Image (tube, rainbow, N blue to C red):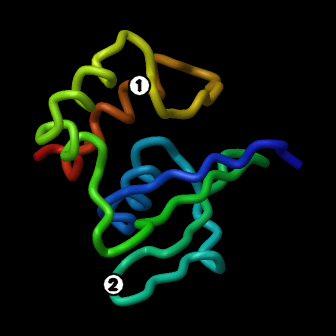
């Protein structure tokens, strides 16, 4: 069992869930998908024996990228050469993994 389970928030949880499956090959545990009022409140994706959880936390949730467009200070503290929030995922073939991810989006993140 993994000791750390990443939990990620997305404005459009369902679209994100489908993109993560298509672009990165995650497999969904369909029994854990919960949708309330059209909003993904919980889902689990598997990569081998590991899982990540994703959701849209509330109807008012807004991505960091949208927030930083309005907030100059937030934009400044996020303008660093490293990842502020993210995941470390080991893959067998990095070039193939990158190619598949690039071919599959993430169109829904663009604003």
Residue at 37% from the left image edge and 10% from the top image edge: 81
In space, the residues marked 1 and 2 are separated at their CA atoms by 31 Å
Residue found at the far front of this picture: 73
> In the image, residue 84 lies at what x, y percent?
45, 26
Residue at 69% from the left image edge and 52% from the top image edge: 51
Residue 73 is left or right of residue 29, and the answer is: left
> In the image, residue 31 lies at what x, y percent?
65, 80
Residue 49 is left or right of residue 68, and the answer is: right
Which label number is shown at residue 38?
A: 2
Residue at 12% from the left image edge and 41% from the top image edge: 70
Q: Nearer the viewer, residue 89 or 99?
A: 89
> Could you classify mark 2 by the number of other residues whose Cα lies within 10 Å: few (under 14), some (14-19), or many (20 or more)?
few
Which label number is shown at residue 98?
A: 1
> Could you classify mark 1 by the number of other residues whose Cα lies within 10 Å: few (under 14), some (14-19), or many (20 or more)?
some
> In the image, residue 17 lies at what x, y percent?
43, 60
Residue 110 vs 62, above or below: the answer is above
Residue 83 vs 7, above or below: the answer is above
Residue found at the far top of this picture: 81
Marks 2 and 1: in contact by CB < 8 Å? no
Residue at 60% from the left image edge and 28% from the top image edge: 88
Residue 97 vs 108, above or below: the answer is above
Give the mark, 1 or 2, whose residue is nearer the N terminus.
2
């Amino acid at each position: 069992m993994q000791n750390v389970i990443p939990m990620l928030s997305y404005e459009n949880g369902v679209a994100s869930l489908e993109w993560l499956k298509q672009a990165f090959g995650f497999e969904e545990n369909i029994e854990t998908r919960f949708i309330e009022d059209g909003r993904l409140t919980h889902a689990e994706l598997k990569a081998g024996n590991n899982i990540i959880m994703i959701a849209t936390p509330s109807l008012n949730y807004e991505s960091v990228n949208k927030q930083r467009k309005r907030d100059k200070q937030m934009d400044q503290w996020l303008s660093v050469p490293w990842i502020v929030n993210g995941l470390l995922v080991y893959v067998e073939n990095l070039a193939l993994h990158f190619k598949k991810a690039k071919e599959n989006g993430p169109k829904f993140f663009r604003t």
